[in-house]
């Protein structure tokens, strides 16, 4: 495992734990504001559940390097699953986390694929090295 990939895994894992803790504490109302209007579940329940998921996935990414591929895939899937909330924030014009213009909310949409790619690369899923026969 390369030093860069290990660093990327540790950084993303730590950031996920921090974001999860923020979901449950200081930024809870900001996260509630991002739950789409069409979500059929209580906003606070969504925020708490996603915060717990972020803490679990982030801690596992840091603490369980033997399972980094699986956790990287799960993190990427998590980022895909929450993407509709980012789209809803843009479409509904919801202000949260300093995203107070349509332009800022739109530009944020392009960060989600970066997170997905980051999880897959840090988890060793991408790129796959091909071994040549000697």
Image: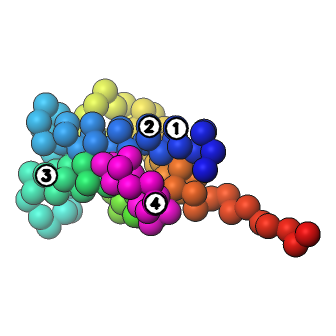
Residue that mark 1 sits on: 7
Relative side of 12 to 94, left or right: right
The question of residue 59 being in magenta is answered with yes
Counting other residues with Cα less than 10 Å from the Cα at mark 3, is it few (<14), some (14-19), or many (20 or more)? Answer: many
Q: Position of residue 97 (x, y in %)?
A: 28, 31
What's the CA distance linking mark 2 and mark 4?
A: 17 Å
Q: Image quadrant for the C terminus?
A: bottom right
Q: CA distance from mark 1 to mark 3?
A: 28 Å
Q: What label sits on residue 66 in the rendered view?
A: 4
Mark 2 nearby-residue class (10 Å; few <14, some 14–19, many ≥20): some
Tell me how far mark 2 sits from mark 1, CA to CA. 6 Å
Residue at image coords 46%, 60%: 66
Q: Which residues are magenta?
A: 58-72
Query: Which residue is labeled 3 in the image?
Result: 48
Is 25 positioned to the left or the right of 101 in the image? left
Residue at x-position 38% and y-position 55%? 64
Residue at position x 39%, y 38% in the image: 105
Query: Which residue is denoted by mark 2 in the rendering?
Result: 11
Name the colouring of the figure: rainbow
Asked whether 134 or 46 is in front, the reply is 134
């Amino acid at each position: 495992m390369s030093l860069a990939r290990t660093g990327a895994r540790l950084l993303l894992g730590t950031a996920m734990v921090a974001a999860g803790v923020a979901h449950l504490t200081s930024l809870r109302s900001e996260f509630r504001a991002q739950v789409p209007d069409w979500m059929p579940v209580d906003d606070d329940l969504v925020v708490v559940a996603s915060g717990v998921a972020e803490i679990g996935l982030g801690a596992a990414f840091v603490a369980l390097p033997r399972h980094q591929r699986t956790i990287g895939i799960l993190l990427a899937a998590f980022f895909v699953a929450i993407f509709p909330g980012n789209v809803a924030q843009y479409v509904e014009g919801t202000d949260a986390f300093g995203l107070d213009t349509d332009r800022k909310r739109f530009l944020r949409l392009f960060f989600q694929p970066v997170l997905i790619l980051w999880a897959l690369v840090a988890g060793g899923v991408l790129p796959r090295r091909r071994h040549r026969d000697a």
